Amino acid sequence: MLETALIMIALGIFAGIAGAILGLGGGIIVTPILTLGFGLNIKYAIGASIIVVIATSSGSTIAYLKDEVLNLRVAMFLEIATTIGAVAGSLLTGILNPKYLYVLFGLLLIFSGFNMVRKLRAKPSDYGTGKNDRLAKKLELDGSYYDKNLNKTIDYQVTNVPSGLSVMFGAGLASGLLGIGSGAFKVIAMDTFMKMPLKPSSATSNLMMGVTAAASATVYFFNGTILPNIAVPLALGILGGAVVGSRVMQVLPTKWIRIVFIPVLLYIGGNMLLQGFGVKL
């Protein structure tokens, strides 16, 4: 038991750091390791991943709020679309063929991955340069943050709000219908469509995932799919790792965050695309 607990804490630290930096919550790291590496039943691995997401969000959001990196107004606004999509997805379960959503969102993730490659090849820029958006202005979604890598305050404008809302509705739909996490979609909605800088996008995604996961954690708890001997040490490690990851993210060049994020996007997108065509990895 002690050996397992120590391994889970170490895994949690790693997942917390990676999740806080990329805005993915850490569940994408923990679930395959628990199922493939430890032979844990997938339903218990998913239950543990819910705790992972909440712990990553809690640990990193504290630091991001203190340093004013995340955009709270954007987070709360986009959560409306995510929640509506999740409810719609749960209602459509058994009615809509999920393979079409797998293909659609797989293609979206792959497109976003290549879009990030294009941004890497363009001249370095870490701030939103989109045109003024009337809806964003009305809702006061524009923001600023202090970049510790560039040692200056970055002011950015949020644009294409309807497009971001559409992606977030789709992410909620996929979560409710397919039972998948939507961290990658949250970052895509803000970075690719709403033209927010990657660092605030990642920080804001961490907060939003915690809100979404907390809503579903109760269901997993009463279903008995959250194992305390796995979830507790994981959460302890993740809380520490997320705090470290949130500090590391702020001093990393945006270019390196994209370099790490791109293969993750392409992997998730490719996996979803294959599942849409009936191929399971």
Image: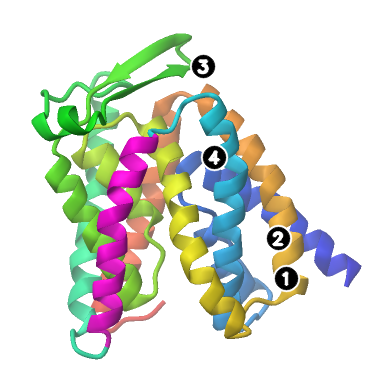
Q: Nearest to the eye among marks 4 and 3: give it.
A: 4
Task: Look at mark 1 in the image and give the residue it sits on.
Answer: 230
Spatial separation of the CA atoms under disc 2 and disc 3: 29 Å
Closer to the camera in the image, 41 or 75: 75
Q: Earlier in the sequence, mark 2 or mark 4?
A: 4
Q: Is residue 200 above or below residue 54?
A: above
Image coordinates of residue 139 in percent, x first then y, are: 21, 33
Q: Earlier in the sequence, mark 1 or mark 3?
A: 3
Judge the density around disc 2: few (<14), some (14-19), many (≥20) Cα neighbours within 10 Å.
many
Q: Label 2 vs label 4: CA separation?
A: 18 Å
Give how far apart the Cα atoms at labels 4 and 1 are. Answer: 23 Å
User: Is 266 left, or right, of 252 in this rendering?
Assistant: left
Q: Are marks 1 and 2 in contact (CB under 8 Å)?
A: yes
For disc 4, the marked residue is: 61
Which residue position is annotated with label 2? 234
- Name the mark on residue 148: 3
Question: Within the image, what quadrant is residue 2 found in?
Answer: bottom right
User: Residue at coordinates 69% horizontally, 57% vertically from top-left?
Assistant: 235
Q: Position of residue 64 (x, y in %)?
A: 52, 32
Q: Are marks 2 and 4 in contact (CB under 8 Å)?
A: no
Q: Nearer the viewer, residue 242 or 265?
A: 242
Neighbor class of circle 4 (other Cα within 10 Å; few <14, some 14-19, many 20+) is: many
Alpha carbon distance from label 1 to label 2: 6 Å
Q: Is residue 183 left or right of residue 133?
A: right
Is residue 9 found inside the magenta-colored segment of the image? no
Residue lying farthest bottom? 94
